[in-house]
Each structure stands twice: as structure tokens, then as C-alpha cells.
Image (cartoon, rainbow, N blue to C red):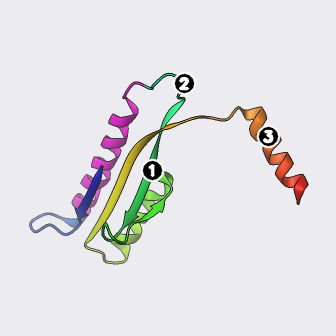
Amino acid sequence: MKKTFQLNIEGKHPDRVLEATKHEIRKYVKRQRRVPLPVGVDYWDFDCRFGASEETAVVVHFAAITGLIDAVVQGGGTAFYIELLAKTGHRLAKASRDLDAQADSSAD
């Protein structure tokens, strides 16, 4: 999904437009996660970019998107650009994550 969302649409309440925008993003993510996983893949992950326009968009973490949208609204923004591209993800085994964390802390 690569899209610029307008937040001020004539004849529509801004709060309803904001809710509809968030709903559309969640619906897209839910639809992408229903796509069957390829062999050897654990989950669907997303590459995300967010900004006032496509040219100013920066890479962000997927979990931060809702907060960024709310920040645009609080700042009085009239539109924002979001790019969500599905990619494959691989989970690390919990034991190996713990070992990596211990190795990092012992190196300090």
C-alpha cells in the first residue's frame, strides 16, 4: 500500500475521516496477513515509511504508525503519506535470542 491520505475532506467530520483512515490501514494489514506463507517463513512483516508527503517519508517501525498518524492530526496536518510493503519474517528461537542478549551484555 502506497497512499496519501487526506484528513480534511469537505462535508465529512475530521474524526470520522481519521477513523476511516486507520480502519483502511488495519484492513490492508489484516488482508496481507491472511495470504498463505511461503515455505520456511514464520510470519508476514512490513516495511513501513511515513511522512507528510512521499518525498519526505522516512522508514518507521510498524508499531509506531498509529502514534505517528495521531501526531499529524494533533499538529494540524491535512494529509500524510504511508507506505506498507509486506515482506517475509523469520523468528529467532527464544534460546538463541537469550544467548545473543547475554553475549551483548557481557561484551560491555
Amino acid residing under circle 3: Asp
Q: How far apart in space, not on screen, are marks 1 and 2 (Cα)?
A: 19 Å
Label 3: element kind: helix
Q: Is residue 8 above or below residue 42?
A: below
| Residue 98 numbered tag | 3
Q: Between disc 2 and disc 3, whose residue precedes?
A: 2
Q: How far apart in space, not on screen, are marks 2 and 3 (Cα)?
A: 22 Å
Magenta region, residue range: 15-36
Q: Quadrant of residue 50?
A: bottom left
Q: Between disc 3 and disc 1, whose residue precedes?
A: 1
> Foreground: 81 or 30?
81
Label 2: element kind: loop
**Measured from the top left, where is residue 17 in percent x and y?**
22, 60
Q: Is residue 24 left or right of residue 96?
A: left
Label 1: element kind: strand
Amino acid residing under circle 1: Asp
What residue is at 31 percent from the left and 41 percent from the top?
Answer: 27
| Residue 47 numbered tag | 1
Label 2 crowding class (10 Å Cα cut-off): few <14, some 14-19, many 20+? few
| Residue 40 numbered tag | 2
**Measured from the top left, where is residue 19 in percent x and y?**
28, 55
Q: Is residue 92 left or right of residue 108?
A: left
